Image (spheres, rainbow, N blue to C red):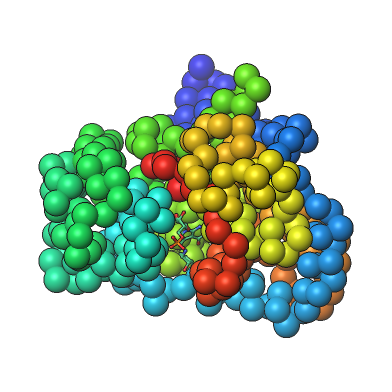
């Protein structure tokens, strides 16, 4: 095969199979598969009138804020511009799920708790230590005064990360980023391949639906923490979708962008704070329609601001950070979010 040069490409291009795979051709499998759900959803829908009224009110000044490098909240994180930041973000995003069973526990307790531990002991996130971490050590890592929800699961997920880093990347999360060759989608796929805990998907009406929330948020965090440069430089960062959590759907509902059926909202579990099962139609539709809603917002913003001097078209992840921070600030006045016991978000 020498004369065809394929051998050379294989040796030089990282993960060539991804470049030609459905992942690249169909863009992001999260975008494609959540669209499949949004077109059929019974309990949730994306209200295009709501989308257009939000974009109507979106000023150029607000858009500049959303697309500025400061949109990523570095104060909440350990950011030293080096590979230890990548190790830190992978650990945080391996644990970045399901805080609500503990009324007082919020995301910042996770990110700032791990940051404080790392500043006390720079070896605390070494892969060979993560491989053996216990539930009690996870509680200590966060510096939380009591057990954290799903504590033993969180320890298992960290042990999985430690083992994968030792097996494939010489213990360094930064090596995994480098192996993705500057592609955000390839890095999402690579992380989901080596760590089953990041394979956030469901089966909906017989079709596999990918949300990949923690895998995508890890890539978004690396991009944000490094300001889109060095280890954070991804040529296809605009291909990532928003991160399907439980905070942003509430924000989109208060904006009139997302609508829930009466069964789901009034009579249903949400207002009574009952659990909605992971993988149920309701849960998958809430998450998938949230992804589709942010894509619709993004397209409507592009239609309004394409070519406008000084306007930068936002990535889905920048819209996500804007909506999530808004939801965090307003969470006391917002209606309750849906409650799913899960390791995915
Ligand atoms: N969609 C989306 N979901 C996000 C985040 C973040 C972390 N954002 C920081 C990182 C960079 C940015 O600049 C932000 O400062 C956490 N979560 C999810 O929210 C839920 C936690 O909610 P609560 O219980 O209220 O703390 C839980 O599912 C968690 O996984 C985000 O950015 N987008």
Q: Residue at x 73, y 35 (%)?
A: 41
Q: Nearer the viewer, residue 158 or 325?
A: 325
Instruction: List the single residue furthest toward the top.
Output: 1
Above or below, 226 against 37 in this view is: below
Give the residue at x 14% y 51%: 136
Q: Residue 54, located in which quarter of the rendered image?
A: bottom right
Q: Is residue 236 visible?
A: no
Q: Residue at x 55, y 55 (%)?
A: 337
The percent position of residue 258, horizontal first and vertical second, equals 72, 53
* 271 versus 302 height, above or below: above
| Residue at image point 73% right, 82% down | 61
The answer to whether residue 103 of the structure is visible from this angle is yes
| Percent of width and height locating residue 118 | 20, 66
Q: Is residue 223 left or right of residue 139?
A: right
The residue lying furthest to the bottom in this view is 61
In the image: residue 189, left or right of residue 87: right
Q: Nearer the viewer, residue 76 or 224?
A: 76
> Does residue 165 appear left or right of residue 49 in this picture?
left
Label count reads 0
Q: Nearer the viewer, residue 167 or 54?
A: 54
Residue 38, x across and y down, in percent: 73, 38
Left or right side of 259 for 234: left
In the figure, residue 27 lies in which quadrant?
top right
């Amino acid at each position: 095969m020498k004369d065809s040069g394929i051998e050379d490409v294989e040796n030089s291009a990282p993960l060539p199979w991804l470049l030609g795979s459905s992942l690249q051709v169909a863009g992001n499998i999260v975008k494609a598969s959540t669209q499949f759900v949004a077109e059929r959803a019974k309990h949730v829908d994306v209200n295009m009138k709501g989308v257009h009224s939000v974009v109507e009110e979106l000023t150029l000044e607000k858009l500049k804020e959303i697309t500025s490098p400061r949109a990523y909240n570095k104060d909440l994180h350990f950011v030293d511009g080096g590979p230890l930041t990548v190790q830190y973000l992978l650990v945080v995003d391996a644990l970045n799920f399901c805080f609500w069973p503990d009324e007082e526990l919020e995301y910042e307790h996770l990110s700032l708790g791990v940051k404080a531990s790392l500043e006390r002991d720079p070896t605390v996130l070494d892969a060979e230590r993560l491989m053996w971490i216990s539930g009690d050590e996870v509680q200590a890592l966060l510096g939380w005064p009591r057990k954290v929800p799903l504590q033993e699961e969180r320890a298992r997920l960290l042990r999985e990360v430690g083992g994968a880093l030792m097996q494939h990347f010489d213990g360094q999360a930064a090596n995994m980023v480098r192996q993705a060759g500057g592609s955000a989608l390839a890095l999402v796929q690579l992380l989901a391949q080596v760590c089953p805990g990041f394979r956030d998907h469901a089966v909906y009406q017989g079709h596999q639906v990918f949300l990949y929330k923690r895998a995508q948020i890890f890539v978004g965090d690396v991009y944000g923490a490094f300001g889109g440069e060095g280890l954070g430089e991804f040529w296809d960062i605009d291909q990532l979708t928003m991160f399907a959590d439980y905070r942003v759907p509430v924000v989109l509902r208060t904006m009139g962008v997302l609508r829930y059926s009466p069964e789901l909202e009034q009579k249903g579990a949400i207002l009574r704070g009952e659990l909605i099962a992971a993988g149920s139609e309701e849960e998958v539709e809430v998450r998938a329609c949230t992804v589709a809603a942010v894509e619709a917002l993004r397209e409507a913003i592009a239609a309004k601001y394409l070519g406008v001097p000084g306007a930068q078209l936002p990535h889905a992840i920048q819209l996500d950070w804007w909506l999530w921070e808004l939801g965090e600030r307003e969470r006391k006045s917002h209606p309750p979010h849906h409650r799913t016991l899960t390791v995915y978000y």
